[in-house]
Image (spheres, rainbow, N blue to C red):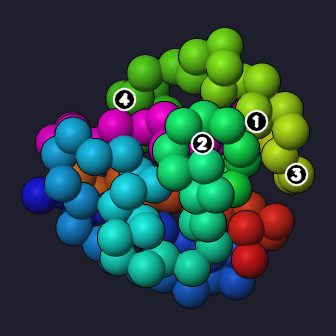
Amino acid sequence: MPKILFVEFSGAEHGVEAKVGDSLMQAATTNLVPGIIADCGGNCACATCHVYIGEPWSSRIAPPSKEEKEMIDCALHVTAESRLSCQVIVNDELAGLVVRLPESQT
C-alpha cells in the first residue's frame, strides 16, 4: 500500500497507508485525517475534500474532469494545484505523495 503524507495548513503531518484503487479522500477519512470532511461521500458534489497537489505529483495523476473543475471553482483558496481528493485515485506510482490542505480545510 502506498504511503501518502497529508499536511494540514498548520503544518501538522499525517502519514497514511492508502489502498490502491481508493481515492485520496477515502484514504484520508479512513485514517481520520483532520480537514477532509467529504460531505458528499466522494461524488464530486461539494468541495469539502479540497487539497493541493503540486509537482512532481500533479503530472502523475489524471487531469481534473469538467465536473471537478466546476466544483473546485466553488472552493476557497483555489490555486493551480487545487484538486478534490475524492477524484484522485491511489496507485502505486503515488507512493510518497505529499498532499497539502488549504486554510479553508481546518
Dot 3: what SS? Answer: loop
Considering only order in the chain, which callout, 2 or 4, is on the residue closer to the N terminus?
A: 4
Residue at image position (86%, 52%) is: 77
Quadrant showing the C terminus = bottom right
Q: Are marks 4 and 3 in contact (CB under 8 Å)?
A: no
Residue picked out by circle 3: 76
- Determine the CA span between mark 4 and mark 2: 15 Å
Q: Does the magenta segment cover residue 74?
A: no
Give the amino acid type for the residue marked by disc 3 in the picture: Leu
The mark found on residue 60 in the picture is 4
Q: Nearer the viewer, residue 15 or 25?
A: 25
| Left or right, residue 45 beside residue 16 | right
Q: Are marks 1 and 2 in contact (CB under 8 Å)?
A: yes
Residue 38 visible in this rendered orientation of the protein: yes
- Determine the CA span between mark 1 and mark 3: 8 Å
Q: Are marks 1 and 4 in contact (CB under 8 Å)?
A: no
The mark found on residue 72 in the picture is 1
Considering only order in the chain, which callout, 3 or 4, is on the residue closer to the N terminus?
A: 4
Q: Are marks 4 and 2 in contact (CB under 8 Å)?
A: no
Give the amino acid type for the residue marked by disc 4 in the picture: Arg
x and y percent of residue 45 in the render? 67, 37
